[in-house]
Image: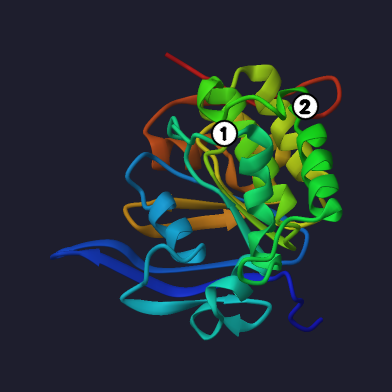
Amino acid sequence: MGTQINDIEAKEIRVSYGIHEILKGVTLEAEQKKFIGIIGPNGSGKTTLLKCIYRTLDPAQGAVYIGGEPLTSMKPRESAKRLAVVAQHNYYNFEFSVQEVVLMGRSPHKKALERDNAQDYEIARRALQTVGMEAFSGRSFSTLSGGEQQRVILARALAQQTPCLVLDEPTNHLDVTHQLQLLKIVKNLGVTVVSAIHDLNIAASFCDILYVMKDGRIEGHGAPAEVLTTDFIRTIYNVETEITRDSRGKMHILFLS
């Protein structure tokens, strides 16, 4: 099967800060409509790799491709039509309404100074409805809680209507209910997803393929059941675990003190 428009590939990515090498030849492939998880200890390079994929960081070596095309050959507006981002949450003080923030996701599809039209407003409304925030449309974004802001930022990404989505630990600041809700939404979008995830049980539940990072390298990849073994978790995280399955056959990782 040939390269699809919504495939993401990072090849031999190297990034250094001064003399310190952060990424040491990282290669990752995300095939169309697969949910790819990146796991690993803090400081392993997950966010740095994602920043290379969503174009806020230029690798010293290697390249990122979307649909077989090098990211560097695309204008920012073009890549923004292919790839939307939900970065790690910080509290934002945007003096915009929730609706205005979500409409920002339409900007890659607009010409300079072109105003939002009825279709844009409907796309924004549906995106807010999808994340359960439609009732907050007229609220000031800066008055929302961190979890509410994160759901609005996801709605902005949905309004962008891209075939690829990059998430950097998107469930931080969310309670369990909204963690599961957000990832179910993402899982059902039918797009290619690359996400850094710190919770191994969430990674096991939602990801088709996991890439495991440690010290700037990929230490392994495969289906969650292949990757998340007691021995491998001990090697990567230096913790003891038990792997169980519930009555539905769903995998659970228990951390032992």
SS at circle 1: helix
Q: Position of residue 129 (x, y in %)?
A: 82, 33
What's under tag 2, amino acid-wise?
Answer: Gly
Give the Cα distance between marks 2 and 1.
26 Å
Q: Name the residue that disc number 2 marks.
A: 132
Q: Which of the image's four quarters has the C terminus?
A: top left
Q: Position of residue 125 (x, y in %)?
A: 81, 39
Left or right of 223: which side holds 26? left
Q: Quadrant of residue 254?
A: top right
Left or right of 154: which side holds 5? right
In this view, the residue in front, 115 or 217, is: 115
Instruction: Give the residue displayed 37% in from the left and 33% down from the top.
Output: 238
Q: Position of residue 35 (x, y in %)?
A: 70, 52
Q: Position of residue 228 (x, y in %)?
A: 58, 40
Q: Name the residue that disc number 1 marks.
A: 200
- Up/down of 5 relative to 142, above or below: below
- Up/down of 112 relative to 180, above or below: below
Instruction: Give the residue displayed 71% in from the left and 36% down from the top.
Output: 183
Dot placed on the residue nearer the N-terminal end, 2 or 1:
2
Instruction: Give the residue displayed 54% in from the left and 31% down from the top.
Output: 199
Instruction: Give the residue displayed 36% in from the left and 39% down from the top.
Output: 42
SS at circle 2: loop
Left or right of 100: which side holds 39? left
